Amino acid sequence: MGFHVSKAQDEKEDKKSPIQVTGSVGFYYDYYSYTQENYASFRPRYPENLLRLNAQMSINFGKHFSIPISVNVTNQDVIYNLPSVPEESALDYIQNPANNISINPKYKWAQGFFGTQTPMYTPLTTGDIPIFGVGLEINPGKFILSAAVGKSQRAIEPDILLNIPGAYEQSIITARIGVGKIEGSKFTINVVRVRDHKNSVLANPIGIEPIEGLTISPYAEFKMFKKLNIRTETAGSIFTKDLFNNGVIDEDYITAVEDFITVNASTTADFSHNTRIDWKGDKFQLGGEVQYIGPGFLPVGYRFVERDILDYKVNTGMKLFDNKVNFTGSFGIRTNNLNDTKLSSSERIISNANLLAQVTESFSVNINYSNFGFKNDANILNQRIELVNNSITVSSSYTFKTEKYMHLITGNVALTSFEQFDVVSNAFAKAENTTYSINYNISFLEKPLSIGLQGIYLENQLPTGDFTMLNYGLIASYKMLDKKLTPSIGFNFAHVDVPGFTTDYRKNLNLRLGYKLTKKLQCKLQYRYTNFRYGNSKPGAALDQNRVQFSIQQRF
């Protein structure tokens, strides 16, 4: 694959044209190989040959009409069985989950969606399930209308020998209508429907039942006094967990929707609510959020959700000393089993804080703290769950300049502690991780040369066994041919020590070459060699890995 760009194009790039192309397109090739000795259980970490084509671009016709195009395709095959195996058509290829192709033409307030898309409406309806299909979104004045339909899951035949459970073909329909601006204040009614096609496979998937669900919600989002943002949503859902269930249900509020969704004994109906308020000033911000998810509620446009919970969250932020000190933090409590749907209830505490201080023009410090706790109220030993995770990271950087050199020194210390109650030993098991790293980089001001040194020390204390690792490396890069060609070389050496065993050694060589063919066309070539020599933890074991990566990218 190649690209041809004339110098005349570069010289005329500033001239206006009725058709403008922006974005980038790139071609990538990876090659991987390995050899091993006395390490038969090793499995390759990359495919042997990997081809990728990535394009993120927009073709603009005048001021109002544009065609955004996204293409991410690969030569990788799917690793599961389909209901039938004909010759793969062009449509089959672009629907392959490993690929992503979308064309989304837009004219003023109207936009169409063709190919892979992810409708993102609200926190309680749809937002993280990609579908392959078509969609439409219009926002003339203050009128909002959106709709999409497509396939969110291909049918996959189960295979016990390959440990593939299989899956039903799944389709999703989404729609919303309202007033306001899509990217601003608005009020919308949102509807999302998901359905598994139970006859899409020859054999029923293992341990998976076909589902069908419907979620409806009113959603409001608006600004007040320019700095106050409020959003609120109440959603209701009807969800059938097994379309093969032959039982009946006589609840009036559920049977009333039999014309829209399959209803049987596995059908549940419930609601949820989310409200968030944020006040953002120039120097100070404060916000809060409350969320309730009922035990029978399911936002069908999201893959995973924890139900029967109540969340309270508070967040804040401030800028001090002429914005030289920035602080952000949040604190939240999640309570579950509000409706006694489980044998035990639990509370979780989630908090984090970040402090960034620019002490001087040359010296800065960043401190980050995160805490997560979980504890249920079960008295029975094998139902008891209790854990605490704490982490703190301190990073700093110092820059200074002399007549000929620019120096950058960075340091990092990370401490992590994870403690969990073990029902087998009837005691707490604790894992701790400590990491120290330091980097030094020097740039020569009179020549295009830079050199970097790195050192990392890692210490892990685990219930299953402790180990330490010391890694140090060197990297150097130089620019030549009027800074169009940039070769670089890097070398890392590490040794890993496990108590009771002799040391494992790892060596890594990294060679890179970058070349700018034009201002917007660049190619890169990289070779990475990794050598492992193991101690008596794997007697006589050795592993060599080779990876070659080539890419060429054109920006518009």
Image (spheres, helix red, strand yellow):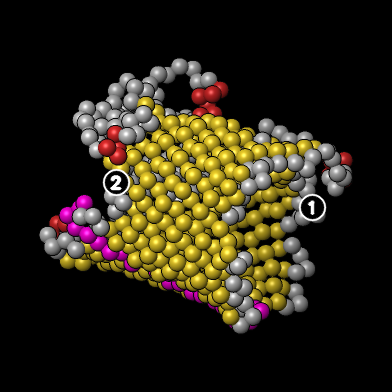
Q: Magenta stretch mostly in which secondary structure? A: strand
* Residue for point 34% across, 22% down: 199
Instruction: Measuring from the top left, give residue 129's x and y in whole percent.
Output: 46, 41
x, y percent for residue 114: 59, 32
Please, what is the three-letter code of the amino acid marked with disc 2?
Answer: Gly
Q: Residue at x 43, y 63 (%)?
A: 289
Task: Tell me the CA gap for discs 1 and 2.
Answer: 66 Å
The span shown in magenta is 341-370
Q: Is residue 367 above or below residue 59?
A: below
Given this view, does label 1 or label 2 mark the residue nearer the observer?
2
Residue 481: give its label: 1
- Specify the quadrant of the image occupied by residue 60: top right
Q: Position of residue 464 (x, y in %)?
A: 25, 59
What residue is rendered at 66% in x and 35% in y? 105
- Earlier-in-chain disc, 1 versus 2: 2
In this rendering, the answer to whether 51 lies above or below 320 is above
- Is 178 in front, or is 406? 178
Position of residue 249 relative to residue 439, above or below, is above
Question: The residue under label 1 is which amino acid type?
Answer: Leu
